[in-house]
Amino acid sequence: MKKFLKRLAAGVLAAAVAAGLSGCGMATSGKRIIRISHAQAETHPEHLGLLAFKQYVEERLGDKYEVQIFPNEILGSAQKAIELTQTGAIDFVVAGTANLETFADVYEIFSMPYLFDSEEVYRSVMEDTDYMQNIYASTDEAGFRVVTWYNAGTRNFYAKTPIRTPDDLKGKKIRVQQSPASVAMVNSFGAAAAPMGFGDVYTAIQQGVIDGAENNELALTNNKHGEVAKYYSYNKHQMVPDMLVGNLKFLNSLSPEEYEVFEEAAKRSTEVELAEWDKSIEEAKEKAKTDMGVEFIDVDVEAFKEKVLPLHEKMLKENPKIRDLYQHIQDENEKIKGGQ
């Protein structure tokens, strides 16, 4: 089965690259094929959101476009898929902000620990479309642009042994996203950060290469990490979005009417993803507890926060491009705090 899937992925990828390089992307029916890559399973909220995207586009432009969605990193890791989106070999990819840091420094801010005071602030900032458009356009020179965001939840630590205080992280090897800020955060807790691709995490924990990782609850169930890491601690160090990234040349080739359809499709995909996210988190927690024996641990968040807050000033000093967005978020933190 694994060999078959690898052959299938290689075939699809070769076809996508060939289509992109030829600049046609046409099916035999004459329709333009729109290829979307993402790393999640077909039950994941992001996939369900993308199905809504596909439905909206095809209902209105089905005579011109056919949308094909490739889950489970079939077209390669997020970083590879971003490169394919840059060249136009594929049209859209869902990528984490850590993957976008390479192309635009401003995205580093989402790796800053304890940036948002609450999920309410997080959603308020991300739903401020007018403000976020400036951030989305920051990768234009790289050949792609973010068209919408998806909730990727609150990131927490999970491991083979319990993490109840920051001291419990000392000496542990913890997988992080391939982001310098995330590496600095985990090291500040006294752990050893181990940057690696998401697809390698299960085996790395299973084989003892790492002791744990940090992610949202869906990693336990959708990616089966709960089979190898039985302790999940709510230290809430990051709230990060995933981004739907589109090839800029393709976006610019659309007529104003077509662009409006794709823009609305992206917006609707986010609405579906957000609604499905909240449901799926509750289901994942229940499944992880009952079927996998995962223990969920509430911790003193302030104790963890104190360890890494100095990183804010360090990151602001080293990367001036995040200052405006940082201040915007702090203003929103204060505004919502004042209203409570």
Image (spheres, helix red, strand yellow):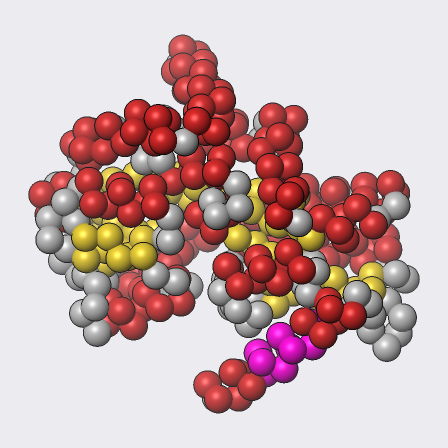
The answer to whether residue 180 is visible is yes
The answer to whether residue 230 is visible is no
Where is residue 176 drawn, in percent x and y?
Answer: 31, 53
Where is residue 330 drawn, in percent x and y?
Answer: 41, 20
13 over 232 or under it: above or below: below
For this view, does 239 lie left or right of residue 4?
left
Where is residue 214 drawn, in percent x and y?
Answer: 30, 51
Residue 12 is covered by the magenta coloring: yes
Residue 117 is covered by the magenta coloring: no
| Among the 4 quarters of the image, the one containing residue 113 | top left
Q: Residue at x 38, y 40 (%)?
A: 111
For this view, does 295 lie left or right of residue 5?
left
Q: Residue at x 26, y 41 (%)?
A: 185
> For the C terminus, which image quadrant?
top left
Where is residue 276 drawn, in percent x and y?
Answer: 53, 49
- Name the chief secondary structure element in magenta: helix
For this view, does 70 lie left or right of residue 219?
right
Q: Nearer the viewer, residue 74 or 135?
A: 135
Farthest residue, direction top: 338
Count of numbered circles in the view: 0
Q: Which of 187 and 224 is in front in this view?
A: 187
Q: Which of 7 and 314 is in front in this view?
A: 314
Q: Which residue is drawn at 75% across and 57% down?
A: 55
279 over 288 or under it: above or below: above
Q: Which residue is drawn at 83% across and 61% down?
A: 65
| Among the 4 quarters of the image, the one containing residue 284 | bottom left
Q: What stretch is highlighted in magenta?
A: 8-16
213 over 190 or under it: above or below: below
